[in-house]
Image (tube, rainbow, N blue to C red):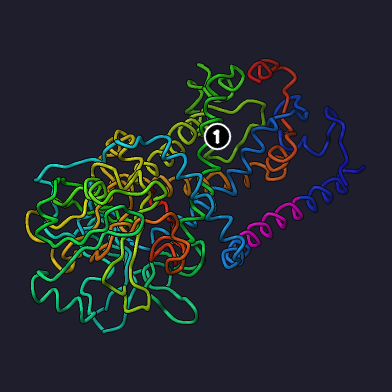
Amino acid sequence: MHTQLPADTNAQNRHLSAGRAQTSTTTIKRHSLTTRLWHWVNFITLIILLMSGLQIFNAHPALYWGEQSSFSQPFLAIHARKGADGSARGVVQLAGHEIVTTGVLGLSNSNGRLRERGFSEWATLPGPQWLSMGRNWHFLAAWIFGPSIVAYLLYTLISRRRRRLIFPTQAQWREIPTTLIDHARLRFHHVADYNGIQKLTYILVLFGLLPAMVLSGLAMSPTMNAAWPWITELFGGRQSARTIHFICAFSLVGFFIVHIALVLVSGVFNNLRSMITGRYRIQVSSHDETEKGHG
Amino acid sequence: MDKSAGQQLDHNRRRVLSGLGALGAGALLSGCDRLSNNDTVQQAVGSVENLTRKAQRLIASRQSLAQEFDASQIAPVFRPNGETNPQEPAYRQMAKNQFVDWRLRVDGLVSQPMELSLDQLRNLPSRTQITRHDCVEGWSCIGQWTGAVLGDLLDLAGPQDDARFVVFHCADHTYGGSDLYYESLDMIEAYHPQTLLAYDLNGEALPVANGAPIRLRAERQLGYKQAKYVMRVELVDSFKTLHGGKGGYWEDRGYNWWAGI
């Protein structure tokens, strides 16, 4: 059952803004249908891309810099080796340092016994070692994700409304320190517009990480390398592209974790509803009507 | 509606929403694994290969060359992979005699079937190139290859009009299996100027570990296309009747025939 509460006399939400004079809440339409569809399609395709990507990584769980693999000196390697006591242990080697990760990375449970594997079965798609199927899932999801990010970015650059949505105003640039402090205190302002930090984060993800994922992925394709060698050169060689693909993927995992955490602490219901139905409840200050000007 | 009832409703909604979320994520993960084992799903997911092939054929011209590198970038050891020491008696015998008895057969849909010795192959028009080998597993290795240009060899044999693929039959049963290794290229990739039957690696006769006496180099494709221990080049109009019918040893085991990505 869904009851639409009167917008401006909503008593239960008033406590959110306790201490501020004369505030009330109202519901606005925050996310367009395109944005909502794109968000959930991304949610599914990015999970498939990540997990099938880890399956592909497991076929050779080591990363290098440059054009080719310097097998004896990887930048990162996840494998199993015998410890001093003769028992096998999973280890992660990163730039010369080693961390024991038995059970999670390098050596983990598969079909009832410990086996050498980069990432554990629960993190890969498919679960068991199966490179060809991992590649098929990866390219299927990539064919959905790639064209949709290109279309979305073009649309964002062309549409004036979307440009205003994404790029911070001068006031928002100035307010960034205050916004940072507010976030650290978990004090969130539920207003129509995104704040400066939100906008900068979305710019970094939309125009940085997501295109970098697509390009570094294409940079690893030998046919693409023959057709458009500049892509591979942009990343400093094929193995660098593979390493950057991996780093960007885990940067997106980092974004995902912070994103989920903020969704949870800043009002999970309001946030989820805005991404499903588009409707978002905001605070309106009666003697601060300028706030509406941003939206 | 009073305040507490409203809160209760909100609370319930939240629980339902987060429950649905967790359920969805769990179903997605276990579902994908179950889907992976379904033949129809495997075919559907794998059919994306055709889209990739068409898109890449559109972007890469027939002549666009794989990147070539400087001699200083050649890897100290070219990493061997797959079969590295075939145990088939016929092959062992040829290897013992430095492959003087080895003959390459070129047949199938050609007007002039041929048999060539290693010396005859070495006297054909050749090309030397320093290229990067990209394995499907993810690693790369740079080496210098010298070999007969496949397109020139095919012209000598004269492909018939209905020839659509070039199949490379090899001497080895990879990992001791029952199938001989084989691979195939379409005519575009077979006639690409960098596609060679390579007999030298880094200026010396190709070692056994890397495919002696000759291996295929198709530089715009992944490593599993680069068939080693090649014995026979057959032109066909379809590879449906060969082995598993998918056009290659790894293709018969689920890998894509189009190995451009």
Q: Position of residue A36 (x, y in %)?
A: 67, 37
Q: Position of residue B5 (x, y in %)?
A: 88, 48
Q: Is residue B19 magenta?
A: yes
Q: Position of residue A93 (x, y in %)?
A: 28, 62
Q: Residues within 10 Å of mark 1 (few under 14, many from 20)?
A: few
Q: Residue at x 56, y 30 (%)?
A: A152
Q: For the N terminus of chain B, which image quadrant?
A: top right
Q: Main secondary structure of the magenta part?
A: helix
Q: Residue at x 45, y 45 (%)?
A: B53
Magenta stretch, residue numbers: B14-28
- Amino acid type at mark 1: Asp
The quadrant holding residue B115 is bottom left
In front of the other: A91 or B106: B106
Q: Residue at x 86, y 48 (%)?
A: B4
Q: Is residue B106 above or below residue B243?
A: above
Q: Is residue B64 above or below residue B109?
A: above
From the viewer's perspective, tell me whether residue A293 is left or right of residue A123.
Answer: right
Q: Is residue A59 magenta?
A: no
Q: Residue at x 19, y 64 (%)?
A: B210
Q: Position of residue B15 (x, y in %)?
A: 75, 55
Q: Is residue B191 above or below residue B231?
A: above
Residue furthest right in the image: B1
In front of the other: A223 or A83: A223
Residue that numbered label 1 is attached to: A182
